[in-house]
Image (cartoon, helix red, strand yellow):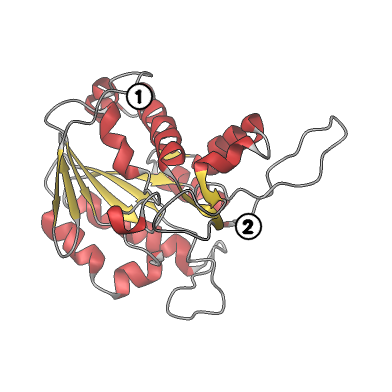
Amino acid sequence: MRILCLGDSIMQYNDGTTYPNTGWVQELGRFLPVGTEILNFARNGRSSKSFIAEGRFEKVLAAAREGDFALIGFAHNDEKSGDASRYSSPAPDGEFRRNLEYFVVNLWAKKCLPILLTPVARRKFLSPDGDGICRVENTHGDYPEAIRETAAKLGVPCIDLTRLTGELLEDSGVEKSKMFYMNFPAGLYVNYPDGKEDNSHLRPDGAFAVSRIAAMEMANFGNAFEEYGPLSDSIVGKKAKDAGGDVEIDDEYVVFQK
């Protein structure tokens, strides 16, 4: 089984020079069986627009094979309205939705099985509500709904990471949730001696949590999408297994072979 991954820094492979920054796809192999191959094309700073414009999607299609699954996760950089090279509007007739459709239709042409992902929630809490609970603010605007609606229109699965990771943050609370993100004091990591206060990018605990959520959602796909049955049946379970795989770094993507 092979899984193609398209996205930005929240998904990309990170080496030791940026540790503990960890793309969540780096942990996904823990939930998949021996023989699984993950081709991670995700790159820092890319939006759906720039991913296409730079020719990165062409490289995905060149590598794609019949029966591959494809995880498609954009929005963080599409939101940057001040950057014409990356911004795409989530409006009903906007470029963002057209880009998602472009990904899906072209992957279908390669007989691949695409899956749309809403973006991982940022760790930004609102003031306590009447019940004393700090809710997570929606910092992604209309993008999550644009993704949900596009998935429904095209009849492809959607993993609602925005909602699910938001619930994870609220359950964890304001302080404990820092462990998931690049938010830590000085002196903990060699690569960041002065500490970091980044509530978008993930540490290993966050990458593990997001990959577990994604895996559990994929485990249910076979109930609604018959052709996704092989992926659903392959999910190892709620307890993580040792990834125990090999990583091969290419100029264009990273291959994880379990």
Pointer 1: what residue? 219
Tell me if residue 71 comes above or below residue 81 in the rendering: above
Q: Residue at x 57, y 64 (%)?
A: 91
Q: Residue at x 57, y 50 (%)?
A: 145
* Picture coordinates of residue 157, whole percent (x, y): 39, 38
* Picture coordinates of residue 65, whole percent (x, y): 11, 47
- Secondary element type, mark 2: loop
Residue 63: image quadrant is bottom left
What kind of residue is marked 1? Ala
Q: Residue at x 54, y 66 (%)?
A: 79
Label 1, label 2: how far apart the Cα atoms are: 28 Å
Which badge, 1 or 2, is on the more N-terminal residue?
2
What kind of residue is marked 2? Gly
Q: Residues within 10 Å of mark 2 (few under 14, many from 20)?
A: few
Q: How many marks?
A: 2
Pointer 2: what residue? 141
| Residue 104 visible within the image | no
Q: Residue at x 23, y 49 (%)?
A: 108
